[in-house]
Amino acid sequence: MINILKQSKRLNLVIVLVLFSFFCFALSIVRVIYTHTNEYLFLNWNLFLAVIPFVITSVLIVKQVKNKYTLIVAGLVWLLVFPNAPYMITDLYHLGFSDLATLWFDLVLIFSFAWVGLLFGIVSLFDIEKILKNYVNSKINNVVIILIIFLSSFGIYLGRYLRWNSWDIITNPIGLIVDILDRFIHPFSHPRTWIFTLLFGVFFTLIYWSIKIIRKQYSNLNKINHLYE
């Protein structure tokens, strides 16, 4: 497995994300020991869910899956679970709700989980963009990525405020569909839904493209440096 990751130039990335995840887990354990409560242990479960879309796209990239039917099925499953990654940003909502630990520690704890969850999501989204390049041109690719971001923002709203989970599409599809359709049929009755989706979608889009541009700039810089070596 390690050799496969090396060949796909993904090993260093996986190591960093795994170490970051262990750091988050360690912080949560320290908080349990200090406060004698488990109120923030749920962040570990949220992080586990955030890792799933990264695992799906990693398998597709490393295994170089080309079968269209496999890609479609994997893509639909990925789209269903992808919002769990950027969702972790909204866990900052819990900051300051407890006086059992110092605020600065809770800030580092929650932000660490939020950031590594977001990283898993962004890398996963980069993977999807890379896969789509084999089938559509760059303009359509960009439109699809933006559409995914705003769909995930809507999904995050469903999770944070309506408390729906990804697996509810199987366990309670009727209730989920009713809630979704109600917001599309009566959009003006649910202003918070669309304001949240719009703002979070723009926010996530700016983060995604900022990292993409920075990555491209440094990639070009490295190419220039190699010319003078």
Image (tube, helix red, strand yellow):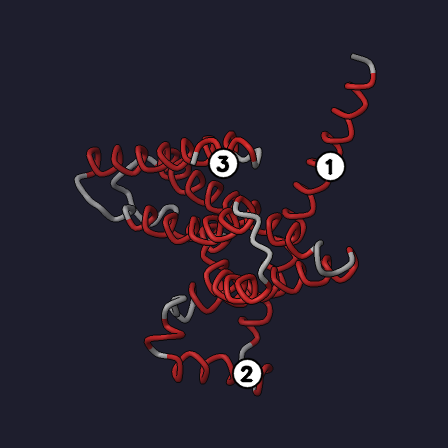
Say whether marks 1 and 2 touch (CB < 8 Å): no
Pick the residue in front: 119 or 59: 59
Pick the residue in front: 174 or 67: 67
Q: Is residue 222 above or below residue 5?
A: above
| x, y percent for residue 134 | 70, 55
Identify the residue under disc 2. 189
Circle 2 packing at 10 Å, graded few (<14), some (14-19), many (20+), is few
Query: Which residue: 41% across, 42% down?
Result: 113
| x, y percent for residue 12 | 51, 29
Q: Quadrant of the rendered structure where residue 149 is? A: bottom right
Q: How far apart, in angstroms, are the residues tagged by discs 2 and 3?
A: 51 Å
The answer to whether residue 196 is visible is: no
- Element type where label 1 sits in the image: helix
Identify the residue under disc 1. 216
The amino acid at mark 3 is: Ile
Instruction: Tell whether 95 sits left or right of 215.
Output: left
Circle 1 packing at 10 Å, graded few (<14), some (14-19), many (20+), is few
Query: Which residue: 55% across, 33% down?
Result: 7
Q: Is residue 175 above or below residue 194?
A: below
Q: Nearer the viewer, mark 2 or mark 3?
A: 3
Q: How far apart, in angstroms, are the residues tagged by discs 1 and 2?
A: 42 Å
Q: How far apart, in angstroms, are the residues tagged by discs 1 and 3?
A: 25 Å
Instruction: Tell whether 117 sits left or right of 30.
Output: right
- Residue 4 numbered mark, or none: 3
Query: Which residue: 56% across, 61% down?
Result: 71
